[in-house]
Amino acid sequence: MESAAKPTPQRVLSVDVLRGLTIALMILVNDPGDWGHVYAQLDHAAWNGFTLTDLVFPNFLFLVGASIIFSLEGRIARGESRRALAGHMLRRAATLFAIKMFLSAFPHFHWTHLRLFGVLTRIAVCYLAVGLICLLTRRARALAAIAAGLLVGYWAIMRFVPVPGFGVPTHAMPILDPERNLAAWIDRGFTAFTQRTIHVGSLYNRTHDPEGLLSTLPAIATTLIGAVAGLWIRRVGGTKESGVFGSKPRARCLSGLVVAGIGGLAAGLAWSRWFPINKNLWTSSYVLYAAGWSLVLLALCYWLIDLRRMNERPAGRGLLLPWLVFGSNAITAFVLSNFIVEAMLWIKVPVGAIAGPATGPAAIDAVAPASSISSWLWVYQHGFARGQSTEVTSLAFALAFTAVCFVPNWVLWRRKIFLKI
């Protein structure tokens, strides 16, 4: 990883703020003190449907797409060749994947059951795919057409292609049967292949994976929609490089984001009647619905920061600071949170006086008598759930953990260090 003395001039403050909010929420929902006591909106929907948590990851991919535009056009304007940019994208994606593999293997490095899929893997693939597409064309209509093709194509595949051994969806089984859908079948086949050939691979849910192979196609569409939004902001809303300024262009940019967001919400809900909103399979209706919320939230940030100039007032700067800190080193914050979790689950401490049973990340420690437990479970039991674990204590732990992850990012921010993968 390399550091720069200051952010690149292509950074857009409203995007950084929304990215920071997204990363903070991602850490919060991923790390409750007790998975047995979690508020419904802070956990994923079991299958069809959606919660607040289900909108976090697609919002991050949406912002990845927007950031690709801001970075790419600025670097091309400085004279960097497309070949060099493609090489940089490939190296960055490979680095993200390598970090994911390290975090999955740490600390025991048992490769046989290593999960190849995951959040960082999906970010790497979507970043590389959309980055290379944007190297070929940055016409908004072309990017939107590719996204539409991916969404319609994914629906058609999931709806009409027979699933070997099960039959045709909607005839032999429901269109999104958890075990008998084409995406799950492909994930099982891919994992069986990697186990036979390189002795590596596992699925998050044993029979299917929420970041599997086939569902990466609509995830790329999510990132492409973000790229279209980035083009809209850059060319309509005005940036230093575009030379477009004034209240009218920015007001037009704001209205465009709002209209597109409402349209995405409506389209996603309408399509869900035939192709349900489902985060596990990243369905096309889910893409449109989540993108609708992303556009509305981006419009809100754009209105507060680019139009209302919230960041130019002391109170506004104070409110925005935590999200700017998280957003300026977003991947660093996410990777650090994962590393801390793995380390705390690995480090064992004496059992001591356990306040009560828990069902958190280290609940396995409480299954059988032992002389030591993970430091994660110890901290939760002794610091938060003294006497009884509840949704409140579980959320309090998650908030405290998010604050802990904020501190090193704040140190980087204060030193004007912005890490790039």
Image (tube, rainbow, N blue to C red):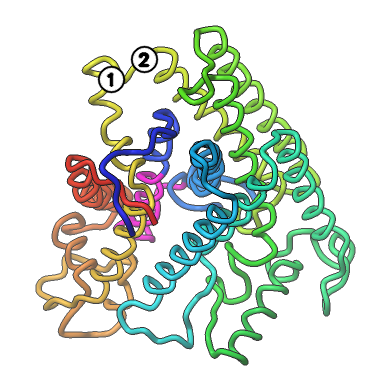
Q: Do the residues labelled 2 and 1 touch (CB within 8 Å)?
A: yes
Is 24 colored magenta in this rendering? yes
- Give the number of the mark in front: 2 or 1: 2
Q: Which amino acid does label 1 sit on?
A: Gly
- On the image, the x and y values in percent for residue 193 come to 66, 85
Q: In which quarter of the image is residue 309?
A: top left
Closer to the camera in the image, 31 or 381: 31
Work out whether 200 lies above or below 101. below
Find numbered disc 2 in the image and state the secondary structure of the residue it sits on: loop
Quadrant showing the N terminus: bottom left
Which stretch did the figure color magenta? 23-40
Residue 316's disc is 1
**Residue shown at the point (62%, 66%) measured from the top left:** 212
Sequence order check, earlier mark of 2 and 1: 2
Residue 32 appears in view: yes
- On the image, the x and y values in percent for residue 211 come to 58, 63
